Image (spheres, coloured by chain):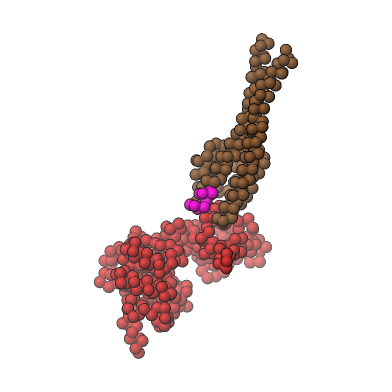
Amino acid sequence: MYTLKVEVNSVKEVFDVLPKRLVHWINSIDEREIQKIEEIRIRHSQALELDVNGRVMYLPGKGSQQGVRDEEMQYILNQLSNYSLYTLDEELKRGYITIKGGHRVGLAGKVVTDQGRVKGIRAVSSFNIRIAKQTLGVADRYVPRLIQAGKWKSTLLIGAPKTGKTTFLRDIARIISEGFPSERLPAKKVGIVDERSEIAGSLKGVPQHTFGPRVDVLDACPKAEGMMMMIRSMSPDVLVVDEIGRKEDTEAIVEAMNAGVRVIASVHGDDWHDVRRRPALEPLWEGNVFERFVEFAPHSKPGTIAAIRRPRDVTQAVSK
Amino acid sequence: MKLLGAIFIICASTGIGFALARNLKERTKQLRDMKQAITSLEAEMVYTMTPLAEACHRVSQQVPSPVSTFFSTFSDALQKGESSAYQAWTKSLASLKAHSCLQQSDLDVILQFGASLGQQDLEQQQKQVKLTLSNIDRQELEASEKQKRSENMYKSLGFLGGLLMTIILI
């Protein structure tokens, strides 16, 4: 258990894939700012762009004539692929590569299609490295409200993009797998179906984030199918999925419920009312599938929780 | 004394003849080894998607020297962090040139293969392998024909040349 919020994973892991000149540029800024880097954008013959805590920064300086060179773009691609681009066929089709530490590198450039479907990206002209930051402990203080009689409740996390749903989800998965001694919760088996490789940030199937001992991950697997696979093959106590919304997802969740598996999921939306209106999610309300709703506050610091509701509160709110 | 000198000359020239003949034979064999290596490399790339450094390391264990040394040198260079795969390939090829019987035209074919290695997707990589293999095939055919034509000639020429020289000297 983490009493203080601890940020793990470091920007420096990304330096391994960058050419020396660019690393030198980044190292020229303040050490504390380096730790706050959220995104590094590298564009062909342009200056390096950093997103430091929401603030944009150009290196080596705005209006500088020095841009990223052709051979440096090639170098990055070589480092990302271990000089073996053919190993990244699948990743080039999706448009991003996960690297050590769970950081994600998005790609843009010339797209090659085959009968109208994207086959992959050649001639990469932009990289966008998103630094994965795992904040251990963000969910700790909400645990007592997400359990009952020593058991986890199925929970839906509701929030707009960038409000911290995934970070919360990740932390919950960790807490479940490690157990939570202060509430006398034993460690449980967690199955993560990670369609967008965002929760676990797996590299070759191995999660790059800290999850404790009892986590199984299906990486890059379609959610609905993945949930069924998990239930059949890994018998999890709790299933964790990201960004539900399609009809199949709902069906799979109801199915999981019937199998006695708890589900912790996230969904895009402003609050409970917003989500309630979605036709695809309808079956979830009929069966009272979720027993806790965590609403994330928009327009405030990511991770701010506006409310945690129970179905009882919600029905009252509706009948009012 | 004369006899000893005569024997010495004949032995030496015969030796030269045999060495030249062996070179021809070795070139054909090394080309064949190279073909086998590239085929294994293709299998590593296409079926198991092994990264180049590891794939080449495995390939180096499947073929005889000097082709094996070429692939292990290449693999080591990649692991040490060369700026591009092509650069590592070129360097390793230079040392292969010094230790093999391959001719410049053979080396050019191999060099050309290295230019695209690791820079393309699976499909293109496979095409490149096919092209390279057919190019090596052509080199091998040429080498084996040359071997057939000249191998025995070099051997007998070496012996007879030595004989001629002794006769002239005597």
Q: Residue furthest top?
A: B1
**Image coordinates for residue B18, horizontal then vertical, percent:** 63, 26
The part of the chain drawn in magenta is: B41-49
Colour red, chain: A
* Residue A297, image x, y percentages: 43, 78
* In the image, farthest residue toward the right: B168
- Quadrant housing residue B5: top right
Q: Nearer the viewer, residue B63 or B138?
A: B138
Residue A235's image quarter? bottom left
The colour applied to the residues of chain B in this rendering is brown
Asked whether residue B98 appears in the rendered view, the answer is no
Q: What residue appears at the point 34 percent right and 61 percent down from the top-left corner?
A: A233
Tell me: residue B1, above or below residue A314.
above
- Give the vertical position of B73 relative to A312 (above or below): above
Q: Quadrant of the C terminus of chain B?
A: top right
Type of secondary structure dominating the magenta stretch:
helix
Q: Quadrant of residue B151?
A: top right
- The residue at 67%/41% (across/down) is B105
